Image (cartoon, grey):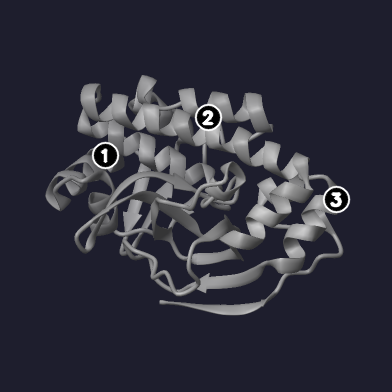
């Protein structure tokens, strides 16, 4: 499902594709990059094998999900892309507990959990940044819970599409209807019906295995209050994030 490729270039933090890493103080970013391995995820699948043991993941072009494993399935609760990290628990002295899946294939940096704990002990700015990022994930989970209790299926789908759009370059989302349905814990037919409605309103365009966001403002309008609260928290704690306006 995935393969390790190379050590990261530690010479220029501004070149890092992961925004969390690029925003760290230069010395801290170099220390993280020095022990990171770049991993390529070839497929978007529900569960990432734990071949490397507990790890800190810093997505670059991949978008990862997190949640709870129930049997062989992953019940997904949220997503992280190039803006953040997964597996931050060693910063608080505990082992990572979330199961991780792949929503959008691509690359991510991987660091063994024990290395993360040592780095956090040596570098307070890194530990503080991980704790701030944890707050953004908590905010995302609050929005997920509220959405599942109070939002229409179309609004929940629009929220997830906005969130994916925030985490990729451009306007094309490489994701299937089936994978979206798995992530939303919805029937595939229901997701397809909702996408057809969005297509009819020229908000998105669907092709095989891809969804193109045509009108971002309209997509956020469909999501309504289901989208935006967690993104506001992220901007307040960590800086600019996400997309606004009208896509091509």
Give coordinates of residue 47: x percent, y percent.
34, 63
Specify whether 238 is left or right of 107.
right
Of 222 and 76, the residue lying toward us: 76
Residue at screen point 39% across, 70% down = 49
Specify whether 183 is left or right of 56.
left
159 to 56, vertically: above or below:
above
Q: Which residue is mark 2?
A: 231
Instruction: Give the quarter of the image for residue 235.
Output: top right
Q: Mark 3 touching mark 2, by CB under 8 A? A: no
Crowd band around label 3 with a 10 angstrom C-alpha radius: few (<14), some (14–19), many (20+): some
Of 146 and 151, the residue lying toward us: 146
Instruction: Give the quarter of the image for residue 33.
Output: bottom right
Q: CA distance from mark 3 to mark 2?
A: 25 Å
**Quarter of the N terminus within the rendering:** bottom left
Of 242 and 200, the residue lying toward us: 242
Q: Which residue is mark 3?
A: 26
Residue at screen point 47% across, 23% down = 229
Give coordinates of residue 154: x percent, y percent.
25, 33
Q: Is residue 214 visible?
A: no
| Mark 1 secondary-structure assignment | helix
Q: CA distance from mark 1 to mark 2?
A: 28 Å
**Disc on the earlier residue, 3 or 2:** 3
Residue at screen point 59% across, 51% down = 82
Specify whether 204 is left or right of 246.
left
182 to 196, vertically: above or below:
below
Q: Which residue is mark 1?
A: 200
**Disc on the earlier residue, 3 or 1:** 3
**Disc on the earlier residue, 1 or 2:** 1
Crowd band around label 1 with a 10 angstrom C-alpha radius: few (<14), some (14–19), many (20+): few
């Amino acid at each position: 499902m995935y393969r390790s490729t190379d050590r990261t270039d530690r010479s220029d933090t501004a070149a890092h594709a992961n925004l969390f890493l690029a925003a760290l103080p230069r010395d801290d970013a170099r220390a993280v990059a020095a022990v990171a391995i770049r991993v390529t995820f070839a497929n978007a699948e529900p569960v990432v094998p734990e071949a490397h043991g507990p790890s800190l993941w810093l997505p670059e072009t991949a978008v990862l999900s997190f949640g709870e494993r129930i049997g062989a399935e992953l019940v997904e609760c949220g997503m992280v892309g190039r803006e953040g990290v997964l597996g931050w628990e060693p910063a608080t002295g505990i082992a990572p507990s979330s199961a991780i899946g792949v929503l959008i294939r691509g690359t991510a940096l991987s660091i063994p959990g024990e290395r993360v704990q040592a780095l956090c002990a040596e570098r307070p700015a890194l530990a503080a940044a991980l704790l701030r990022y944890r707050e953004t994930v908590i905010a995302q989970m609050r929005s997920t819970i509220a959405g599942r209790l109070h939002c229409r299926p179309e609004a929940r789908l629009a929220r997830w599409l906005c969130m994916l759009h925030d985490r990729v370059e451009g306007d094309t989302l490489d994701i299937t209807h089936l994978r979206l349905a798995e992530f939303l814990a919805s029937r595939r037919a229901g997701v397809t019906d909702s996408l057809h409605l969005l297509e009819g309103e020229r908000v998105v365009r669907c092709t095989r295995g891809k969804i193109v966001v045509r009108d971002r403002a309209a997509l956020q309008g469909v999501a309504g209050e289901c989208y935006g609260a967690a993104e506001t928290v992220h901007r307040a704690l960590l800086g600019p994030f996400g997309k606004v306006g009208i896509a091509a």
